[in-house]
Image: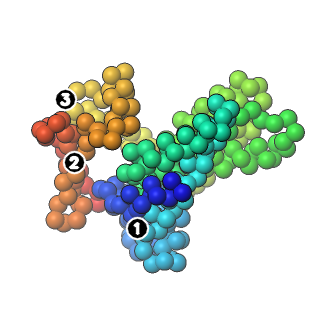
Amino acid sequence: MVALVSALFSFGRGFPDSTLYREYSLFILGKSPTFDETVAMRPMLPLISSIISLLIGDLDLSYALANTAFGVLGTLVSYKLGKSIFKSEETGVLAAVLYATSPTMLWFGAAVLVDTPAYFFIGLVALLALEPIKQIQPRWRTFLQETVAAMGILFKESVVFALLFLLLARFRQRRGFKTALASILLAITIEAGILAFLSLDPLVFVRKFLLAKQYSSSYEYSTWGIIPLVKSFINAFSVFPRDRAIYSVSDSGCDWISICKVHTKKYAHCLPSFSLS
């Protein structure tokens, strides 16, 4: 219930990045000839939203409904994680409430973005990694569970870091390492197949990383290191973050976007504008 109420705060909210996912969905539906290749490795939520839109006729609402479902699933996973780690029902409930009411979920949870499914899958992978494989459980069931979790990379590529944690956990447990590796390789193979179907190559990952690094280097201060990491955690759990992104959208409709860092009331460190088309 808390997760559903939380979703109302961002239900169908649009951001500059939302344009990319709308175009991707329209491409899947055959209504757009092109889309931005930097989101090509995230096909699953645009596909799900496209299917839902065929039933309800509204693409943004389709993203909102899909993300609300993943928000509820993420809340349940948070409950299971809290209960599993601390062996306490009360702690599990507290973890679920904190997850559902976090500023990130309130602001982005049901928006036209792909972050919410990624949070769910990262939590699911962590839950599988922290729970040792049951001796009596058939290997095919373990493979199925871990394959479902590995499919998270089709929603957002950052899930791969959680999957590395799963591999490490299985290696330390000396059980299930090969099964986990096979699940991850299967998900990567499907990802590569989708990119090939779209006439793209895996180097899109490298190009996206280099693009992010280029814009990151445009700041006058370093965005890498211990201090920026600590600040990012503080901002993530702050209701009123000190640094916020301000998006200036032109009259032409999200063709050009300038991203600026805000320090108190002064605008500084503006990045070069770039095209989303």
Q: Position of residue 49 (x, y in %)?
A: 49, 66
Gap in angstroms between the C-alphas marked 3 and 2: 17 Å
Q: Quadrant of the C terminus?
A: bottom left
Task: Write down the residue under mark 1.
Answer: 60
Q: Position of residue 71 (x, y in %)?
A: 52, 53
Vertical order, 168 against 147 (above or below) = above
Quadrant of the drawing holding the N terminus? bottom right
Q: Nearer the viewer, residue 85 or 90?
A: 90
**Which residue is at a point 22% across and 65% down the rendered structure image?**
253
Q: Mark 3: which amino acid?
A: Glu
Q: Is residue 259 above or below residue 226?
A: below
Say if residue 198 shows up in the picture: no
276 vs 24, left or right, is left
Badge 2: residue crowd in 10 Å (few <14, some 14–19, many ≥20): some
Residue drawn 33% across the image and 60% down it: 14
Q: Which image quadrant for residue 262?
A: top left
The residue where tag 2 is placed is: 246
Give the total of numbered labels: 3
**Which numbered disc flags the more N-terminal residue, 1 or 2?**
1
Q: Residue furthest front?
A: 90
Circle 3 residue: 220
Q: Where residue 186 sits: x, y (%)?
A: 66, 47
| Left or right of 111 on screen, residue 158 | right
Amino acid under disc 2:
Ile
